[in-house]
Amino acid sequence: MAQRTALYQVHVDAGAKMVDFGGWDMPLNYGSQIDEHHIVRKDAGQFDVSHMTVVDLHGAQTLDYLRHLLANNIDKLASVGKAMYSCMLNEQGGVVDDLIVYYLGDTDCRVVVNASTREKDLKWMGTQAAGFDVELTERADLAMIAVQGPNSREKFAATLSASERDQAMALGKFSAAAIGDLFVARTGYTGEDGFEIMVPGDAAAKLWRKLNEQGVANCGLGARDTLRLEAGMNLYGQDMDEATSPLISGLTWTIAWDPDDRHFVGRDVLEKQRSDGVDSKLVGLVLEDRGVLRHGQKVITADGDGIVTSGSFSPTLGKAIGLARVPKGAAESAHVDIRGRQLAVRFVRPPFVRDGEAKI
Amino acid sequence: MSEIPSELRFAESHEWARLNDDGTITIGISDHAQSQLGDLVYVELPEVGDEATAGDAIAVVESVKAASDVYSPISGEIVAVNDDLADAPERVNESPYDDGWLYSVQPASEGEYDAMMDSDAYAESLDDE
């Protein structure tokens, strides 16, 4: 049987269409996924993301361990509570997973990895911890609610006491703080402002309902996918995986090359790719014709074929968009094979939409 | 509970058929089907003059989530298609049995329509799903 989050019953009571998502029974939508998408762009919506895996790191060598494990550099996080996006790579420079790491002090960090990769991630992180004075503790006791949208911060803050409210509203982008029982981070996966809130599982339903009372709409994983795609954010397993380097996945910006002597896992291969050059790249696609781009469709360019890694309909733009891995030299436009018809697509630099506005 | 009009016939693959006074048959997808698909964002229809073969894919309905084939329950020549769906595919969600019709066919024979499920049988088949 699929696993259930602490909010399972809340979703069922709200009439959610539940689907299997990486072994979890999760809400796909609560009616219309397009309406849910628009509400996050214009107002505020909440997502149950409790299926994601939270791991706490503790020990004298926590930072040394992360300097070894992550392609991005934990030393960029100068103050307590700051967060950073990073990949962890295998020895071949492929992406084991992408994650968010929170710096909570020199002996404590928190890492959030994907749900569908939980087992292999825990195993990998455990193996890589050998020789470091660091202890890894999975926090399955925590639920997680993402509150996203231009009005989401105010609406969440309204559920707090006066002093907690000030703390929450004072959080800078990509910063987190413990507020009461909650761990509140100003992060997200939608391209909108908002918070990701870790809450003890037994308090999650109460917080969800309080957010409803403030006018925060329930949103499912369907809307979460179209929102992240419009925001130009990669999805692990589709846009990158263990066989693809960050350099061909639009993630070069997440690699901290400096200092030269930080030997993170996969660095040797990346250095070689960097000097030799890579043969492909990840681009954004816009379909000008009617139709829908889908994962796996063939992209035909003058420089050879590529593949759509993520594709969907963009509710904000009213047309199909996608991400695609194409030959490095491919320029500006191409065709995508949709059921035997070749339709013209334009290359764009993601994001497609950010903070409610079209960027292309 | 999805709506199942009693004057229509249904296919196992969730298409509906309406026998019109002029002998043509109009085809769409059921309320149950649109609800399972979720918000439709694109509908690919045949062209007038195309030949439909019963059981073969004749149209595609795409939701945000996925693309699904529509199988023609009736063989014959396509005599009309719902062009309004190009700009408003959501009509299939909002009005699956009316504004959201897909196409009409001049049936090559009478037997295929008669062999389709009536509303009671369709309702029963949904209960079994």
Image: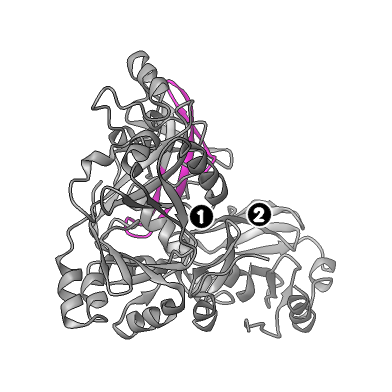
Q: Nearer the viewer, residue A88 or B56?
A: A88
Answer left or right for A213 relative to B105.
left
Q: Position of residue A235 (x, y in %)?
A: 44, 47
Label 2 Cα crowd, 10 Å radius (few <14 / some 14-19 / many 20+): many
**Main SS category, magenta section:** strand
**SS category of the residue bearing label 1:** loop
What residue lies at 37% left-to-right and 60% top-to-bottom?
A315
Q: Residue furthest top?
A: A276
Q: What residue did someone put label 1 on?
A: A115
Local SS, label 2: strand
Residue type highlighted by circle 1: Ala
Q: Which residue is mark 2?
A: B58
Q: Is residue A284 visible?
A: no
Q: Residues within 10 Å of mark 1 (few under 14, many from 20)?
A: some
Chain to which mark 2 belongs: B
| Above or below for A91 versus A146 | above
Corner quadrant of residue A277: top left
